[in-house]
Amino acid sequence: MKKVLSFGFINILSENIAEIIINNNVVITLEMVDEYEQFLTEHFKGDFGLLINRVNHYSYTFEAKLTIGSLEGLKAMAVVYYNDISKKSTHSILTTREVDNFNLKMFSGLELGWQTGIDWLNKELNNI
């Protein structure tokens, strides 16, 4: 199943894993975070994981950084990055939200990171 959003799309990969792909050159706002979280809340009734596929370049407003990843039921996030800019952007969010202690792991898309990320999410969700 694929859900088109105003700034990208969500692929439902399994009963408890969704992939998020943001369009190129988007600045993620608080309203966009609300849009994707509303869909995820309606679709997933229990615990779930996200595969964040950073195939495109995008950034976040400060307000979005403060709220992203706080959705109830979200138990694990795998971030697949393809360049150092995307990797540093993810580290920036982790630094900003250090007290939240996210269950997040990053994978290089240039080293089969997409499949490794899916495998890691399945393992994390099975351990709950």
Image: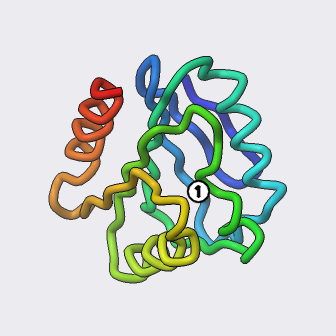
User: Which residue corresponds to the image point at 58% horizontal and 29% vertical from the top-left?
Assistant: 2
Which quadrant does the N terminus fall into? top right
Which quadrant does the C terminus fall into? top left
Above or below residue 102? Residue 4 is above
Query: What residue occupies the far front of the structure in this picture?
Result: 99
Who is closer to the viewer here, 64 or 111?
64
User: Which residue corresponds to the image point at 72% horizontal and 77% vertical from the top-left?
Assistant: 62
> Where does the image place residue 59, in percent across and percent down from the top left?
62, 74
Q: Is residue 122 left or right of residue 69?
A: left
> Where does the image place residue 109, in percent across and percent down from the top left?
27, 60
> Where does the image place residue 83, in percent across and percent down from the top left?
33, 76
Give the residue at mark 1.
22
In the rendered structure, which amino acid carries the disc numbered 1?
Ile
Query: What residue occupies the far right of the structure in this picture?
Result: 31
Report the number of numbered marks: 1
User: Which residue corresponds to the image point at 69% horizontal and 67% vertical from the top-left?
Assistant: 66
- Image quadrant where residue 7 sits: bottom right
Q: Is residue 18 left or right of residue 84?
A: right
